[in-house]
Image (cartoon, grey):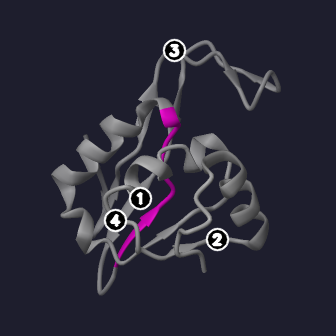
Amino acid sequence: MAIHVKNNVNWVGQRDWEVRDFHGTEYKTLLGSSYNSYLICEEKNVLIDTVDHKFSREFVQNLRAQINLEQIDYIIINHAEEDHAGALTELMSFIPNTPIYCTANAIDSINGHHHHPECNFI
């Protein structure tokens, strides 16, 4: 499910009503949380972040309802924690050559979590 934000920006994230501990035990939530991912379709089609890995298949399925995955020009990962990059492995299995823009530290962390050094990191 996508939610139109503004112009050519859609929220393509995921709600997680079950989560109670966020970022380990650092934050508590009694009402769940959301994993925020945005699809921007302008001159280039850009995906910002993914969602937690437990929603990987649903995320890719919902994203496919919005865009042909091969039309995503690049992905931006803000940081490599699971709430931002958890569905990256599932997504990249369909579009393996799509550039992923992130910091050098994020590359190390993503590879530590997902073990895909072959990704097109920039």
Give the Cα distance between marks 3 and 1: 26 Å
Image disc number at residue 92:
1
Residue under label 2, please give it. Answer: 102
Label 3 vs 1, first from the N-terminus = 3
Give the Cα distance between marks 4 and 3: 30 Å
Q: Residue at x 24, y 43 (%)?
A: 61
Label 1 vs 2, first from the N-terminus = 1
* Residue 9 spot, x, y in % from top left: 33, 64
Q: Secondary structure at mark 4?
A: loop
Residue under label 4, please give it. Answer: 95
Q: Amino acid at mark 4?
A: Ile
**Magenta-tinted stretch:** 45-53
Residue 58: quarter of image: top left
Q: Amino acid at mark 2?
A: Cys
Residue 33 seen in render: yes
Label 2 vs 3, first from the N-terminus = 3
Closer to the camera: disc 4 or disc 2?
Answer: 4
* Residue 98 spot, x, y in % from top left: 41, 73
Closer to the camera: disc 1 or disc 2?
Answer: 1
* Residue 12 spot, x, y in % from top left: 35, 49
Residue 7 seen in render: no
Q: Amino acid at mark 1?
A: Met
* Few, some or many residues within 10 Å of mark 2 (<14, 14–19, 20+): some
Residue under label 3, please give it. Answer: 18
